[in-house]
Amino acid sequence: MHIKIDDTVQVITGDDRGARGKVLSVDRAAGKLTVEGVNRVYKHVHRSQKNPQGGRLSKEMPVQLSNVLYVCKACHRATRTGVRREDDGSKHRYCKRCGADNGQIAPARTRQATKS
Ligand SMILES: [Zn+2]
C-alpha cells in the first residue's frame, strides 16, 4: 500500500467525490482506509456511561483504497505515486506528476539484514 497515516488523499468517486482529508487509519489486509471527514455516518447511540447524552454520533467509515488518490506534498495535486530506489538503497515514494520526493517508505537494507 502506498498510502500511510497522516497522508492527504482525495476521494475520486462516490458521495464525497472531490473531498480531501487526512488519513486516520489504514487497514492493509482489507485494502481500506478511513479519511477525516469522508464517508461520515451517523451512529445512533443510547445513553450510556460513556455517552450520557446518547443521540447521534458522527464517525468516519473506511473507504476502499482504489477510491482515493494520494495528494502530493509538493504540488498539492491528486496523483499516482511511484517508488524509486535511492543511492543508499532506501525506497522512496514520488509524485508521478511533478516528480517530487514524498518520503521514504522503506529503509536502506544492510547486507546483514538480507538473507542469502
Ligand atoms: Zn507533485
Image (cartoon, rainbow, N blue to C red):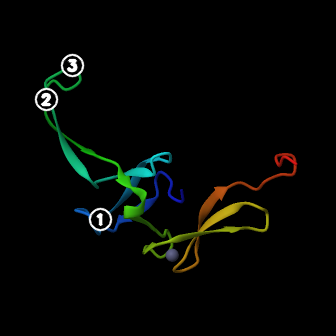
Q: Amino acid at mark 2?
A: Gly
Badge 2: how crowded within 10 Å, few (<14), some, or many (20+)?
A: few
Of helix, strand and loop, which one carries label 1?
loop
Q: Quadrant of the N terminus?
A: bottom right
Q: Check contact, mark 3 vs mark 2: CB within 8 A.
A: no
Instruction: Please state the horizontal and vertical placement of residue 67, each as a whole percent of the image.
Output: 37, 63
Rendered position, 90 above or below 53: below
Badge 1: how crowded within 10 Å, few (<14), some, or many (20+)?
A: some
Disc 1 from disc 2: Cα separation: 29 Å
Residue with the mark numbered 3: 49
Rendered position, 101 above or below 34: below
Q: Amino acid at mark 1?
A: Ala
Of helix, strand and loop, which one carries label 3?
loop
Residue with the mark numbered 2: 54
Please state if 37 lies on the left or on the right of 55 as rendered: right
- Point out the tag, 1 or 2, that comes first from the N-terminus: 1
Disc 3 from disc 1: Cα separation: 34 Å
- Point out the tag, 3 or 2, that comes first from the N-terminus: 3
Task: Find residue 84 and report its image quarter.
Answer: bottom right
How many labels, in total?
3
Q: Which residue is at 13% across, 24% downward? A: 47
Residue with the mark numbered 1: 19
Q: Amino acid at mark 3?
A: Gln
